[in-house]
Amino acid sequence: MGTRDASDGRAAQPEWRVRAAELAARGVETVALTIVDNAGICRVKTFPLARLTEVAERGVGMAPCFDVYTSADRMVSSPHLGGPDGDLRLFPDPDRIVPLAAQPGWAWSPADRYEQDGRPYASCQRLFAKSAADRAAALGFTLTMGFETEWILRRPDGTCPTTGPAYGMTRVVELADYGRDLLRALTDQGVRVLQFHPEYSPGQFEISTAPADGPVAAADDLVLVRETIRAVSARHGLRASFAPTFTAGEVGNGCHLHLGLHRDGTDLHRDPRAPYGLALDAAAFLAGVLERLPALLAVGAPSPASYLRLAPSRWAGAYRCWGVENREAALRLVPGDGHAELKCFDATANPYLLAGSVITAGLAGIAEGAKLPDPVTGDPAGLADVPRLPRSLDEAVDHLTASDELREAMGEVLYGAVLAVRRAEAEDFADSDPERIAADTRWRY
């Protein structure tokens, strides 16, 4: 990936002026420019819309230290990052500037990060996801991706705003205005909703959006969906928590990743001649992901709270196995829709980092001609030969440390920052009981 200089912004100035005029006509006055750090926290810089063309040319400054922040805002250090030195430039994506329906006067854009001299920032997770998608494209593959989002609602006094049972229509009736406003806001922002429904735990809901044409767009959509849920909830006097464990011992919030592999316009999950509809490359891709799930868990379930959620027999995907429409398997094949679902991930993950890491694992599977084991039916908790995924963040980090593929793909700067944050999170909660872990992360996500 080449360097970026001021001419990139100057060449596009007429386009940016037109975009600024369009946004102003829709009442936008301020733009929120976001990144997601390695602890999964969405960090932001904002600027007046009047500066949009200037920001497109010169970017907005932000310190690199956020890549070694924990979820509790403790700055740690890695071999390459940490401390007060340095500055980066954040650039908005012209294709993703969206007026925010639930925040009148505001627009949002994800940011790519560059060094002051125009070089791509080595720890930019969004650029990492782009790079992984480019590696897949160079081999002739494209991916569709999408996320499910689960969250729990509470009033400011901590009480639950619904009384209805799990998956019950009562919850929809009780929060009908809330649900309508949420779906309307997402639609106005160009996000196509597939499903919205109550989930299992008290006050818990889930929304599924249409798969995006590409991993970066899918991660962008997830950030937009999550912050829209947060904004609509606030306008209704509610708080939304995406934390993997809201209450210790209860079913928590997942953030399932759905993906499909394509080549030359052909869906490799719909081969009528292949077992389960999986063409050889699709099967090898999924086998590569399944083999590397223990290391991927340190990316996709990166909080100590994640491992309270990953309990057997809760449909969280606590076992390293796959199955056809098996909601207890970490990897669920959905042949009717032509894709696969990874159930063991949650909203403490950086979605860009996760998308790039999953692609890396899948491409490694294709390169080595990996084979899927036999699928599992029923609850794997009752099967002696099905391995558990890591039961703690420390265990997952050990697997990530041993992953040469992820180290090479991320590069030393990003990889070192991820490991530093994971080890710090594990250290911070080493002496905490489940109730304390849940309480300390409940409103960080």
Image (tube, rainbow, N blue to C red):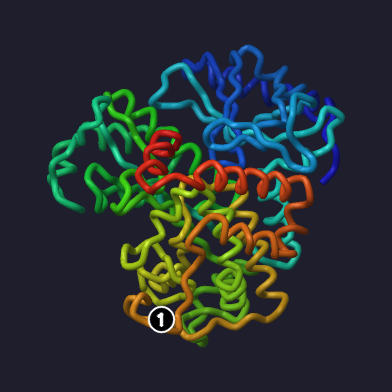
Task: Tell me the quarter of the image containing the C terminus.
Answer: top left
Q: Nearer the viewer, residue 190 or 284?
A: 284
Do we see residue 350 in this rendering?
no
Give the labeled residue for mark 1.
Answer: 376
In the displayed structure, 68 sits above or below 298; it is above
The picture places residue 393, in percent across and down from the top left corner, at 54, 55
Left or right placement of residue 1 versus residue 76 in this view:
right
Q: Element type at marker 1?
A: loop
Density class for disc 1 (Cα within 10 Å; few <14, some 14-19, many ≥20) is some
Q: Nearer the viewer, residue 152 or 390?
A: 390
Give coordinates of residue 389: x percent, y percent.
49, 67
Which residue does the image show at 46% across and 75% down from the upper left?
322
Taking the spot 63% from the left edge, 61% from the top edge, the residue there is: 398
Decide: is 69 above or below 85: below
Query: What's the residue at 69%, 70% (across, down)?
Result: 364
In the image, is 399 to the left or to the right of 169? right
Label count reads: 1
Give the amino acid at mark 1.
Answer: Val
Q: Residue at x 62, y 48 (%)?
A: 423
Please state which of residues 157 and 18 is positioned toward the viewer in this rendering.
Answer: 157
Above/below status of 47 relative to 1 = above
Q: Position of residue 222 (x, y in %)?
A: 48, 44
* Residue 37 place in picture, x, y as percent: 61, 38
Would residue 25 be visible to someone looking at this image? yes
